Amino acid sequence: MAIKNQWEKRVEVFHYIYQVLMTQKPSKDIVKTAFEDFSFDAEQMKIIEYYSMNASDIKGLIVQHLSQNWSWDRVPFVTKAIIITAYCESKVSKLDRKIIIDQALVTAGKYCEAKDKKFINAILDKIIK
């Protein structure tokens, strides 16, 4: 098995959170499914556990920072997943916020449109302290 770099691990967590959002998986099942069905390492599981325990609060925090023209339902799932992954990582890791935001933008560059990348940067800049 190949050794994954940090960005590849982030992308795996992002993909999982995207799947959770798309399927509307109940919070109680998030960690169980991640543990049973995926080969996440301890660091990845901390991010997923943090999300599982705080999903509603995280959504509320993001919604607080949406402009009046936006609603949670209007934000694409992939954009939500990138923001949530970065925010959760900021809460469980000791990485500098600039690195976390930069890595989220790298992920956005691969999976989102350019306009979404700006949106992600603006939201993360407000919620990651």
Image: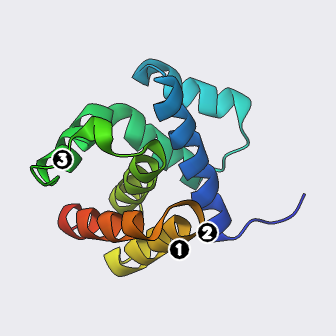
- The local crowd at label 3, few if under 14, some if 14 to 19, many if 20 or more residues have their Cα within 10 Å, is some
- The local crowd at label 1, few if under 14, some if 14 to 19, many if 20 or more residues have their Cα within 10 Å, is some
Residue 7: image tag: 2
Q: Is the C-beta separation of discs 3 and 2 under 8 Å?
A: no
Q: Residue 10 occupies which quadrant of the picture?
A: bottom right
Query: In the image, is residue 89 above or below residue 99?
Result: above
Q: CA separation, marks 3 and 2?
A: 25 Å
Q: Which residue is mark 1?
A: 106
Q: CA separation, marks 3 and 1?
A: 23 Å
Sequence-first disc among 3 and 1: 3
Q: Residue 100 occupies which quadrant of the picture?
A: bottom left
Please name the amino acid that badge 2 sits on. Trp
For the rendered model, the colour scheme is rainbow
Sequence-first disc among 3 and 2: 2
Percent x, y of residue 79? 42, 53
Please name the amino acid that badge 3 sits on. Leu
Residue 61: image tag: 3
Q: Is the C-beta separation of discs 2 and 1 under 8 Å?
A: yes
Who's the residue at 18% across and 66% down the image?
Answer: 126
Q: Is residue 128 visible?
A: no
Who's the residue at 18% across and 47% down the image?
Answer: 61
Please name the amino acid that badge 1 sits on. Val
Task: Please tell me whether mark 1 sits on a helix, a strand or a loop.
Answer: helix
User: Marks 2 and 1: which is nearer the front?
Assistant: 1
Quadrant of image for the C terminus = bottom left
Who's the residue at 19% across and 47% down the image?
Answer: 70
Percent x, y of residue 94? 39, 70
Q: Residue 93 vs residue 128: left or right?
A: right
